[in-house]
Image (spheres, rainbow, N blue to C red):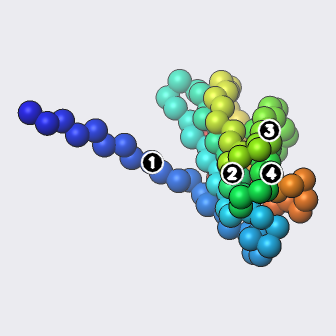
Amino acid sequence: MRRTACIITILIAVCTPNYAHCIGMSGCSRGLELNSFGILTCTADTISSPGSTPEVKAELQKNGVTIKTWSHKSNGLFAVVDESYAVASGYAYQLKTTHSVNSGKFYTYYSRIIYY
């Protein structure tokens, strides 16, 4: 009997900044998910062209105020943040992400708002 595993990936948001290829950025994405235990999963990445240095910063916001920040700068093609954070109920949460390559021009995006 042959078993096949199936993995389903949902990309929450993909950002392809205008003229990003001119600064060495191939793309970026961000995501914010809440599980039934009050744990938010915060993900963000920046994809660069070969020879570039991608950077990503993710700020978890509660009612518009940053409560936690993560960042990653890479020597490879991908800079990735993938973190979990326990949150309290009764608030609105959003992920603000900043993407750049070679510490140059940056792009800022916001995830959808999650009410918990």
Counting from the top left corner in percent of width and height, residue 3 is at: 18, 36
The type of residue carrying mark 2 is Leu
Residue at coordinates 79% horizontally, 56% vertically from top-left?
A: 52
Vertical position of residue 20 compared to residue 79: above or below: below
Cα distance, mark 3 to mark 1?
23 Å
Residue at coordinates 23% horizontally, 40% vertically from top-left?
A: 4
Q: Earlier in the sequence, mark 2 or mark 3?
A: 3
Tell me if mark 2 has few (under 14), some (14-19) or many (20+) residues whose alpha carbon lies within 10 angstroms of its own.
some
Q: Earlier in the sequence, mark 4 or mark 3?
A: 4
Q: Nearer the viewer, mark 1 or mark 2?
A: 2
Cα distance, mark 4 to mark 2?
7 Å
For disc 1, the marked residue is 9
Counting from the top left corner in percent of width and height, residue 12 is at: 56, 53
Q: Earlier in the sequence, mark 4 or mark 2?
A: 4
Residue at coordinates 75% horizontally, 75% vertically from top-left?
A: 18
Image quadrant occupied by the N terminus: top left
Contact, CB < 8 Å: mark 2 with mark 3?
A: no
Residue at coordinates 71% horizontally, 46% vertically from top-left?
A: 76
Tell me if mark 3 has few (under 14), some (14-19) or many (20+) residues whose alpha carbon lies within 10 angstroms of its own.
some
User: Position of 16 compared to 35: left or right?
Assistant: right
For disc 4, the marked residue is 53
Image quadrant occupied by the C terminus: top right
Q: Nearer the viewer, residue 56 or 49?
A: 49
The type of residue carrying mark 4 is Thr
The type of residue carrying mark 1 is Thr
